[in-house]
Image (cartoon, rainbow, N blue to C red):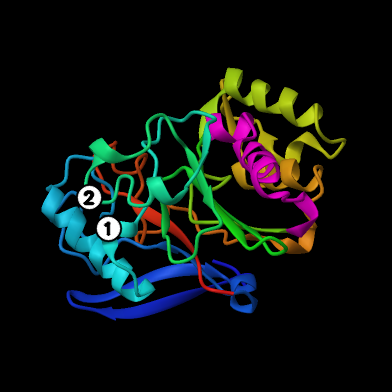
Amino acid sequence: MNESVKRIDVKGPHGTWSYEAPNWAEQFPILMGDTYRHGGVSQAPYASLNLAFHVGDEPQNVRANRAIVADHLSVDPKRISCGNQVHGLKAVEITENLIGAGALGEDTAIADCDAVFTKLPNVPLFLFTADCVAVGIYDAKHHAIATVHAGWRGAIGHLPVLTIEAMKEAYGTEFKDCYIYLGPSIGPESFEVDVELGKRFELAWRGMTDRSVADVVNYPGDKLDKAYINLWNFIAEGLMVNGVPKENISIGGTDTVTDRDCYSYRRESGKTGRMALFGMLQER
């Protein structure tokens, strides 16, 4: 965690729970943050603030954990709205009829959806991660918000950019008016992949910027068949070349693989809970 974000500790019914929040959010009527794993009711291997239904945890535990976060947001947990994440490139607007999609169970989440956005106040947008990059977007001019699930597929497919373009079509959002937060996720020293994927990111990087490839892909000399990818830099660069000011982008820098306060799919061999990036507009 670096100076562009802060950790907020909240006293809950099952102990203190915490989340990371971008400093820029303090100047706007929004609530945005990415939860850590402690302070909930889930048992191992989901211990303890697991916020996702799809991982195998008891549904009543997930509902209880979501209620903890919703209480902090001062909203009914039934208003939580989210997609059924599939590592795709679909962004969906949360309108009145979609409030509460996925709130109480996986079966009501928006199908094949990895990004949601809205202009409706007091509607918490959730997305769930355990290594993938969670991206929060706020359009300060039109008072609109989005949460975006960007694993390597969403990153290389530029889903954060596509989401802002969808917001532009719906609200008139411009890149220059957006503030961005990248939450806890697998870091550049932990995201080891095969060379083929490394080359795909290298090609995509060269297609959008003349900055050094070393800013996004590194090939260690002792592992000729491996590469390390910096998803944070790749996502941020894609947004900046489209017009988001560099100073509006906050990268927390928390590596989920090495930080035991986080869930990590890679560290825990796929059997683990999920953190949640939440974003909610307040009345302006």
Look at the image and tell me whether residue 153 can be seen.
Answer: yes
- In which image quadrant can residue 48 be found? bottom left
Whole-percent x, y for residue 178 in the image? 71, 57
Q: Residue at x 75, y 31 (%)?
A: 205
Q: Which residues are magenta?
A: 152-177
Q: Name above or below for residue 262 compared with residue 266.
A: below
Pointer 2: what residue? Answer: 104
Q: Residues within 10 Å of mark 2 (few under 14, many from 20)?
A: many
Q: Quadrant of the N terminus?
A: bottom right
Whole-percent x, y for residue 20 in the image? 47, 67
- In which image quadrant can residue 215 be found? top right
Q: Given the image, on which type of amino acid does mark 2 rest? A: Leu
Q: Residue furthest bottom?
A: 11
Residues marked 1 and 2 touching at CB (< 8 Å): yes
Q: Given the image, on which type of amino acid does mark 1 rest? A: Lys
Asked if the stretch drawn in magenta spans residue 208, the answer is no
**Label 2 secondary element:** loop
Q: Earlier in the sequence, mark 1 or mark 2?
A: 1
Q: Name above or below for residue 104 compared with residue 25.
A: above
Pointer 1: what residue? Answer: 78
Q: Name above or below for residue 131 compared with residue 228.
A: below
Q: Name above or below for residue 194 compared with residue 93.
A: above
